Image (cartoon, helix red, strand yellow):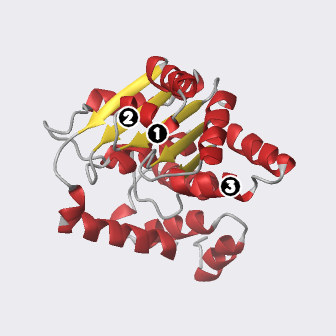
């Protein structure tokens, strides 16, 4: 007995079965697939449904990480001989095993070299592994800490919230001046995340941080925690933001992601 359009409508109306219904409908309508093995057709449909399910599963942690509109992906990071990063390094980052061990990562590079894209891609890779992540720029983090400066409980709650994710990315580290209170709380956060992975993204080499912290003991602790116990990558190359093709690709990807 042949399946009717009404059958496909009923199948698609079932919760979570829309992709299953669409793919099997496309196969049935394609006469070139008539002689394909039944098992192969079913496997194709199941794979499509599982992929759609997994996509939905990772959308939530990506949204919670603050990366809903990010188009970054380690598989899409542009490599060249002058970038200072190899495919082998990207492959090791993509395993996320270093996050399992609580290792840190410092990414340094000039404006437009792609360091923020790499950091976002690392966080998204963690989300794909069903790990929790958080992406924040330092000035935003500083504003949050300053907003709760007068409330010890709110400050404690914010520190605990930022301590929980498997990986936290702090972008634009030391790119702008922030309050002494905020710097102190950032230090407290790094201490609280001693056994969890933190990614620091900065235009400045770690030695510069000594001048910003104004406290040699705090600076030494930060450097020891992030540099000596982690990995430092220096990204080089031309300013990618001047590439019209990359900007157009990003606009198209954002449009597609918002249309889902």
What's the CA distance linking mark 3 and mark 1? 17 Å
The residue singled out by tag 1 in the image is 212
Q: Which is nearer the N-term, disc 2 or disc 3? A: 3
* Dot 2: element: helix
Residue drawn where x is 34% and y is 34% of the image: 205
* Dot 3: element: helix
Lateral position of residue 116 relative to residue 229, left or right: left
> Which residue is at the far left?
81
* Dot 1: element: helix
> Which residue is at the far right?
153
The residue lying toward the viewer, choosing from 24 and 50, is 50
Q: Up-down: is 194 above or below 132?
A: above
The residue lying toward the viewer, choosing from 233 and 177, is 177
Q: Disc number at residue 208?
A: 2
The residue singled out by tag 3 in the image is 146
Residue drawn where x is 61% and y is 75% of the image: 8
Q: Quadrant of the N terminus?
A: bottom right
Find residue 140 and report its image quarter.
bottom right
Find residue 150 and report its image quarter.
bottom right
The answer, for residue 53, to whether it is visible in the render is no
């Amino acid at each position: 007995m042949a399946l009717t359009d009404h059958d496909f409508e009923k199948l698609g109306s079932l919760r979570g079965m829309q992709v299953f219904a669409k793919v099997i409908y496309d196969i049935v309508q394609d006469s070139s697939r008539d002689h394909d093995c039944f098992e192969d057709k079913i496997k194709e449909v199941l794979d499509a449904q599982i992929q759609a399910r997994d996509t939905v599963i990772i959308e939530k942690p990506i949204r919670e990480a603050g990366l809903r509109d990010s188009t970054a992906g380690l598989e899409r990071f542009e490599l060249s001989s002058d970038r200072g990063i190899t495919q082998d390094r990207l492959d090791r980052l993509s395993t996320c095993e270093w996050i399992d061990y609580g290792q840190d990562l410092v990414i340094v590079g000039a404006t437009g070299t792609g360091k923020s894209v790499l950091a976002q891609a690392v966080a998204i890779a963690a989300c794909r592994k069903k790990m929790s992540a958080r992406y924040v720029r330092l000035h935003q983090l500083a504003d949050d800490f300053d907003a709760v400066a007068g409330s010890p409980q709110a400050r404690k709650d914010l520190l605990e919230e930022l301590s929980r994710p498997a990986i936290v990315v702090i972008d634009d580290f030391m790119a702008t001046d922030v309050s002494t209170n905020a710097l102190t709380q950032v230090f407290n956060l790094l201490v609280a995340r001693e056994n969890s992975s933190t990614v620091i993204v900065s235009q400045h080499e770690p030695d510069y941080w000594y001048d910003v912290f104004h406290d040699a003991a705090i600076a030494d602790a930060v450097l020891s925690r992030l540099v000596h116990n982690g990995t430092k990558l220096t990204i080089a190359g031309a300013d990618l933001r001047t590439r019209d093709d990359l900007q157009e690709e990003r606009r198209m990807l954002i449009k597609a992601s918002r249309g889902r």
